[in-house]
Image (cartoon, rainbow, N blue to C red):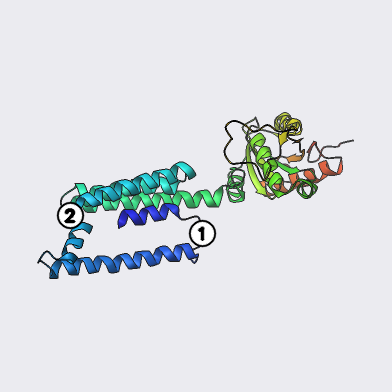
Amino acid sequence: LLPLTLALLSLLPERPINHPLILILLAVVVVQSWLIAGIGSARLSISDGGVIANISELLTSPDLGRLVFLIAGAFIALAYAARHSTFEGSLLWVTAASALALLAWNGPHAASLAFAAAQLVLLLGLVEDSYRLAYHDELTSLPGRRALEEALRTLDGNYTIAMVDVDHFKRFNDRHGHAAGDQALRMIAAELQKVGGGGRAYRYGGEEFTIVFPGITPSAASEHLESVCTAIADRRFAIRSSSRPRKKPDPPRKTSRPPKLISVTVSIGYAGPSARAGNSNAVLRAADRALYRAKNKGRNRVVRYGARTA
């Protein structure tokens, strides 16, 4: 029953504790406890080889246990291959350790050690998954707002902060749909990840991003920001159709017209520490003001806070 429960855990999506699927799993665990108690009572009270005794022997057979552990392990491995989640990876180790404790190692001390290792692995997997949910943006795979706030607290000396905003993003969503908008955000995030100068990109929220350059001045960061702004403007991508199959057909379907290629642009404002912006939060606000100045000057451009532009 333990490997079956672990396999069920690998199927559960990320949901709150009061979600029906979570409640069903809790009910399954309660039923399992009742069933185990019933099997134990049957084994103690029946010794005449009757039907109940035979069923009890079958359910507690080591051969059946090995088979169920093998099936559950393969099932969890498929879930891990599909999601690449740390939690499913930890479930694989828990399944292996539980199989050793129950089927391979004799003696309570070895079994207790294996179960303790399984619990530790599962706890580490939950902690790492919690960190991923809290600090990383699922849509773009960039570090999220909380990770940015922690990075800002570590900045000192020379550094540069840039704010990036997608131009006319609401108009883009209204025209092409929110699915295309998500595609555009993922494309922009991929380009921002390539920024040079040691910069690191973060998802600030909505269609806004932040790039942090530790250890370099705004003058040194300028060329890297110009390059990434140009790279995004020059990038063309095709909108995925809602009727597009998940798997590539074999042979490929012939279409009468080529896919529509579209592009987006971004505006960037950046700043460094100064007399008027003495800490990282003030520099972030200064970069945000420079961003709006870039938008007011025509968008698709990079503007430094405090610099004069025509």
Give the residue drawn at x 14%, y 66%: 50
Task: Give the secondary structure at mark 2.
Answer: helix
Residue 244 seen in the current view: yes
Residue 278 seen in the current view: no
Q: From what the image shows, is residue 67 above or below residue 218?
A: below
Q: Amino acid at mark 1?
A: Arg
Relative depth, front residue between 274 and 193: 193
- Quadrant placement of the C terminus: top right
What number is the disc on residue 15? 1
Q: Position of residue 88 (x, y in %)?
A: 42, 48
In the image, taking residue 241 as reference, residue 248 lies left or right, namely left
Q: Position of residue 39 (x, y in %)?
A: 21, 66
Circle 2 or circle 1, nearest the eye: 1
Q: Residues within 10 Å of mark 2 (few under 14, many from 20)?
A: few
**Badge 2 is on which residue?**
108
Relative depth, front residue between 76 and 250: 250
